[in-house]
Amino acid sequence: SASSTPSVAPVPSVVPGSKPIYEVASDTGNKTLWVVFVLMLIASAAFTAMSWKVPVSKRLFHVITTIITLTAALSYFAMATGHGVSLNKVVLREQHDHVPDTTQVIYREVYFARYIDWCITTPLLLLDLGLLAGMSGAHIIMAIVADVIMILTGLFAAFGAEGTPQKWGWYTISCIAFIFVIWHLVLNGGANARAKGDKLRTFFVSIGAYTLILWTAYPIVWGLADGSRKAGVDGEIIAYAVLDVLAKGVFGAWLLIVHANMRESDVELNGFWANGLSRE
Ligand code: RET
């Protein structure tokens, strides 16, 4: 009958009544976030206690490293409480030959608090490494600016929609910035560390290689999770949790312990930084 006919024809590219799909964390993901929150707090307390063994003027690495884990603790608290997360609308258009194209709306959680965390902590990690190698202020600043660009463009990628250049366009830009970061670290950091003697060079090469491998895993996880959505939200949370504990907690403990056992001349800092950094 006339009354059951819709008065407005459906838009051909939309299947009327198709329900959106939600990709969200389960209990497992949420518990993981709480566990990392606690681990980051413990690491921050431990690094603070380690700093008490050295005079205030020699605590710069302790201070930087503690701020890194403390920032991570705050970001994990935000994510675990459901505050640092947002639903991103990922519209997926499927093309069909003989029937109208369909549009499936998918919502996926984006834990944007991570990017705020990374925007603060990855520059500080680079500062740790740059000061250790004895890089100049100019080179440290260039590496940090490229790093901030990498994180902020990564944030835009995370909120990109599928079927537009948003997601993979920003991802590509972010990866180019990442290559700049690595380049500064390897070429400039390496050259400076070499000039500071064998002991420091060996340590810088080890902790630098460790950093390089871990950092490279982040864009891979992103590609599998936010990017192609092959991995679910829980898998994404767990992968980043392991990486964050290794790249911040284990990295920090390693740096502070080795630094404490080095001779003053091995870890000497120059110029502006010398006041707060000398261990003498
Ligand atoms: C994103 C996605 C876009 C492409 C690239 C990325 C790189 C992220 C990196 C993050 C490092 C985080 C660390 C956290 C602290 O522990 C933003 C994932 C290149 C390298 C070390």
Image (tube, rainbow, N blue to C red):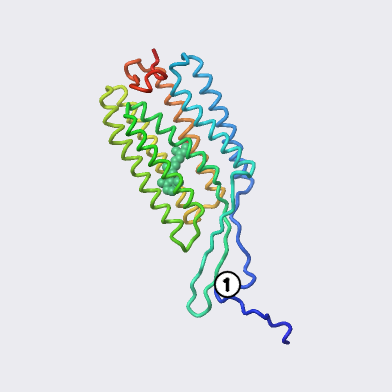
Tell me which residue sits at (59%, 47%) in the image: 85
Residue 180, horizontal then vertical, whole percent: 33, 42
Q: Nearer the viewer, residue 139 or 63?
A: 139
Tell me which residue sits at (32%, 29%) in the image: 135
Work out whether residue 62 can be spotted.
Answer: yes
Q: Quadrant of ligand 1?
A: top left
| 101 is higher (above) or lower (below) than 107 | below
Q: Quadrant of the N terminus?
A: bottom right
Work out whether residue 220 can be spotted.
Answer: no
Q: Nearer the viewer, residue 225 or 111?
A: 111
**In the image, is 87 to the left or to the right of 59?**
right
Q: Quadrant of residue 20?
A: bottom right
Name the residue that disc number 1 marks: 14
Residue 88, horizontal then vertical, whole percent: 56, 55
Residue 208, horizontal then vertical, whole percent: 36, 33
Callout 1: SS: loop
| 89 is higher (above) or lower (below) than 178 | below
Q: Amino acid at mark 1?
A: Val
Tell me which residue sits at (44%, 16%) in the image: 57
Q: Quadrant of the C terminus?
A: top left
Q: Nearer the viewer, residue 127 or 244?
A: 127
Q: How many marks?
A: 1
Residue 75, horizontal then vertical, whole percent: 56, 38
| 229 is higher (above) or lower (below) than 42 | below
